[in-house]
Image (cartoon, coloured by chain):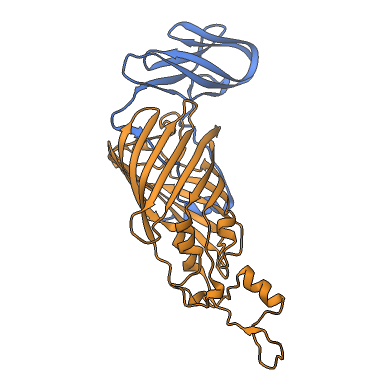
Chain colours: A blue, B orange
């Protein structure tokens, strides 16, 4: 059933965005840190995959930042406050990427997942809401 | 994609609501063995191209799917997948043919007039109300929709070929045959669908065309001996290609609710729009509301 709160939210048109997909921010210097998508699908566990993901960073000040995957620098941005760009990341397994500042302080982290094609998951054969 | 009814997986489920979290629910996939249910509430309508037809109201839209390893139910399609791979699948399926739905929303007293009869009336060869007329024109009785025989719902069965493109889109081709003996014809579908994510919003895009055979069109939109009207008004409908385009916009409001907007436009083709029971050459559908994923 539709709750009254639900209708109120709908009627006033308040659109809130939950940050469940955003990365974990560890510093006040970072307002937003997000990688989308975060999941790479492989045929079987152990296969490598290349995740083409969009990196979005919003810092509170201009700074130098590096995205690091297991101590390997994926990309650095010098004197930037806003970053929004596509990045190809090679993944062999689920891993965490870190956003570091010049002093190698961890500003934010994000978990990237490698999922094998789940035998309990399959391709959908109709687009959503395709009845109409 | 709707969320599964599974309290145990509630936390995971947060990310499986309609386009709620792109990352945890890869677009185009569905978990097997669970019902995926969502309901959209709002306002919308589908235009009715029939003469005297009321637009079909859309207030509550269901979205129901269930997939097992081979069997599936998806918004009315009941199918069994014969070949299933990452890129390609072949399924046999059956479903109701919804052509009949338009006839549920018509005012039966509306008058039908074929083009040839209309021309004959204009030229004076026929007259409708001849009382007091001194002309030699033949008098005709204009039939109304309620003088036509009832059109029945049909059940189609056929094959579906799905190609899942590397970029994330899907091409769907279907060939369906009436298996209920109602219209004894065929229909086919060729469709491309894809989607884009903007932040947490998602825009779905579908373009395609549906083919409807002469027998299908003639059963629903033709007029013949089965109808209690003067043979002057007989009309044989032709096969029709009906191209369409559809847009779907969705944006999460919270863990259960998403804003949902649907727009669809379809050209009906002369095979349908030339029928005396049809007044429009296209149909349009819109819906604005909110969907709730269970």
In this rendering, the answer to whether B27 lies above or below A107 is: below
- Label tally: 0
Q: Residue furthest front?
A: B136
Give the percent coordinates (x, y) of residue B194. 51, 35
The residue closer to the viewer here, B255 or B25, is B25
In this rendering, the answer to whether B118 lies above or below B77 is: below
The residue closer to the viewer here, B106 or B136, is B136
Q: Is residue B115 left or right of residue B66?
A: right
The residue closer to the viewer here, B291 or B283, is B283
Give the percent coordinates (x, y) of residue A73. 51, 7
Give the percent coordinates (x, y) of residue B164. 43, 31
Question: Which picture quadrant has residue B122?
Answer: bottom right
The answer to whether residue B200 is visible is: no
Q: Residue furthest bottom?
A: B132
In this rendering, the answer to whether B250 lies above or below A25 is: below
Placement of the N terminus of chain A among the 4 image quadrants: bottom left
Residue displayed at 43% across by 32% down = B163
Give the percent coordinates (x, y) of residue B172. 45, 38
Question: Which picture quadrant has residue B123?
Answer: bottom right
The answer to whether residue A24 is visible is: yes
Q: Is residue B183 left or right of residue A73?
A: left
Q: Is residue A122 left or right of residue B253?
A: left
The residue closer to the viewer here, A14 or B201, is B201
């Amino acid at each position: 059933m539709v709750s009254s709160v639900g209708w109120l939210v709908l009627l006033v048109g308040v659109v809130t965005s939950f940050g469940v997909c955003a990365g974990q921010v560890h510093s006040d210097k970072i307002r937003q840190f997000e990688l989308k998508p975060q999941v790479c699908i492989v045929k079987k566990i152990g296969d490598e995959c290349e995740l083409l993901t969009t990196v979005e960073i919003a810092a509170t000040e201009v700074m130098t930042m590096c995205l690091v995957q297991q101590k390997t620098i994926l990309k650095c941005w010098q004197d930037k406050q806003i970053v929004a760009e596509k990045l190809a990341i090679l993944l062999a397994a689920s891993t965490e990427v870190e956003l570091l500042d010049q002093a190698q302080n961890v500003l934010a982290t994000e978990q990237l997942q490698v999922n094998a094609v789940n035998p309990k998951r399959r391709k959908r054969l109709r687009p959503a809401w395709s009845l109409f | 994609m709707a969320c599964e009814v599974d309290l145990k997986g509630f936390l995971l489920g947060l990310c499986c609501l309609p386009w709620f979290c792109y990352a945890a629910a890869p677009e185009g996939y569905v978990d097997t063995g669970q019902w995926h249910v969502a309901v959209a509430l709002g306002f919308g309508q589908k235009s009715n191209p029939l003469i005297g037809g009321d637009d079909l109201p859309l207030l509550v839209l269901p979205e129901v799917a269930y997939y097992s390893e081979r069997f599936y139910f998806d918004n009315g399609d009941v199918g069994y997948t014969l070949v299933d791979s990452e890129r390609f699948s072949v399924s046999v399926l059956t479903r109701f043919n919804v052509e009949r739905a338009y006839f549920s929303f018509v005012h039966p007293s509306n008058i039908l007039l074929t083009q040839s009869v209309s021309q004959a009336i204009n030229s004076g060869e026929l007259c409708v109300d001849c009382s007091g007329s001194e002309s030699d024109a033949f008098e005709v009785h204009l039939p109304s929709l309620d003088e036509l025989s009832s059109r029945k719902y049909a059940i189609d069965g056929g094959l579906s070929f799905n190609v899942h493109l590397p970029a994330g889109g899907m091409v769907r081709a279907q060939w369906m045959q009436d298996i209920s003996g109602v219209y004894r014809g065929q229909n086919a579908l060729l469709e491309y669908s894809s989607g884009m994510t903007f932040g947490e919003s998602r825009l779905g895009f579908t373009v395609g065309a549906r083919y409807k055979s002469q027998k299908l069109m003639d059963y629903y939109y033709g007029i013949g001996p089965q109808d209690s009207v003067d043979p002057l008004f007989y009309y044989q409908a032709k096969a029709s290609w009906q191209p369409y385009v559809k847009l779907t916009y969705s944006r999460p409001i919270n863990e259960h609710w998403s804003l949902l907007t649907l727009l669809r436009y379809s050209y009906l083709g002369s095979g349908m729009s030339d029928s005396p029971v049809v007044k429009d050459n296209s149909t349009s559908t819109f819906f604005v509301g909110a969907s709730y994923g269970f």
